[in-house]
Amino acid sequence: VGGSSPLADLFRRGYCVVDGCLDAAESRALYDHYSTQLRTGVLSHVSKDACNVGCASALLPVRDDERRAQFGAEPPAVKKAFELLAGLADDVDAAAGGLELMVPGNVMVAVYPPDGSKYVPHSDWYSHETYNYRFLSCLLYFNPDWTEDDGGHLRMHLDRRPKRAPADGEPGALTDLLPAPGRLVLFFARTVTHEVLPAKLRERWAYTLWVERLPKGPPPKRKPRPEGPAYDPAGERVG
């Protein structure tokens, strides 16, 4: 992840941003590769979820190059991106210690077309989902030359009240992050409510990998998060 500063932000704020994980040529290669697969029907699963209508996605094996071959020849940037994502569990575990994080078998690649498609405010983990062990959400964007005019921001509701507008002088209530090329975003899956805003002009692409943490005993239960500026290594905010 390139040093301790981004991970310090993760534990302090509940999220962090690392830019420059892919160069411009690598982002372009990935964007063109998956856009072609979308047009030719290789990526054909389109969400009918009322909360996430219009998003097309596919699950790709993290470490099995041969299984991914069913989706066609890959640019070298795919392997680089997957190796980066697969190494995040060790990076975070080394920084925090004792979390025993796990990398799942698949990375999701997903696209939001510029037709109003979006994902409403949600969490990547809910306490009633018995077999959901998501701990850390890891997103890697590869949208070439993406600007504010393109939209498609990742909006994080850091106060966990998505219907509440931020008050004056409260810049941290909502944080909008541009899905810029080569940008990696990490946040705690169990505590950060977030949404995907509509892309305005072009397809918006991202990889998502959910680092998991298995419970030692009963499935994890969500606890009320007290007010305060910091998150502990277990993904809960502390005062």
Image (cartoon, rainbow, N blue to C red):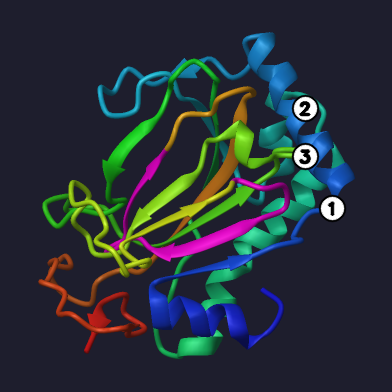
* Residue 207 is at least partly visible in this image: yes
What residue is pinned by disc 1? 23
- Residue 2 x/y as whole percent: 71, 78
* Residue 105 is at least partly visible in this image: no
Residue 150 lies, with reference to residue 215, above or below; the image says above
What residue is pinned by disc 2? 33
Q: Quadrant of the N terminus?
A: bottom right
Q: For numbered disc 3, what is the local secondary structure?
A: loop
| Residue 225 magenta | no
Q: Within 10 Å of the Cα at label 1, are there few (<14), some (14-19), or many (20+) other Cα atoms?
A: some
* Mark toward the viewer: 3 or 2: 3
Q: Quadrant of the C terminus?
A: bottom left
Apparent side of residue 167 relative to residue 231 in the rendered image (left or right): left
Q: Residue 162 or 126: which is nearer the viewer? A: 162
Apparent side of residue 233 relative to residue 39 in the rendered image (left or right): left
Q: For numbered disc 1, what is the local secondary structure?
A: loop
Apparent side of residue 82 relative to residue 137 in the rendered image (left or right): right
Q: Which residues are magenta?
A: 179-196
* Mark toward the viewer: 3 or 1: 3
What residue is pinned by disc 3? 145
**Which residue is drawn at the image coordinates 22% and 50% (left, top)?**
162
**Which residue is drawn at the image coordinates 11% and 72% (left, top)?**
223
Q: Within 10 Å of the Cα at label 3, are there few (<14), some (14-19), or many (20+) other Cα atoms?
A: few
Query: Which residue type carries mark 1?
Result: Asp
**Which residue is drawn at the image coordinates 18% and 52% (left, top)?**
164
- Residue 148 x/y as whole percent: 61, 41
Q: Examine the image and state in which quarter residue 227 appears.
A: bottom left
- Residue 197 x/y as whole percent: 43, 36
Q: Residue 35 or 67: which is nearer the viewer? A: 35
| Residue 195 magenta | yes
Q: Are marks 3 and 2 in contact (CB under 8 Å)?
A: no
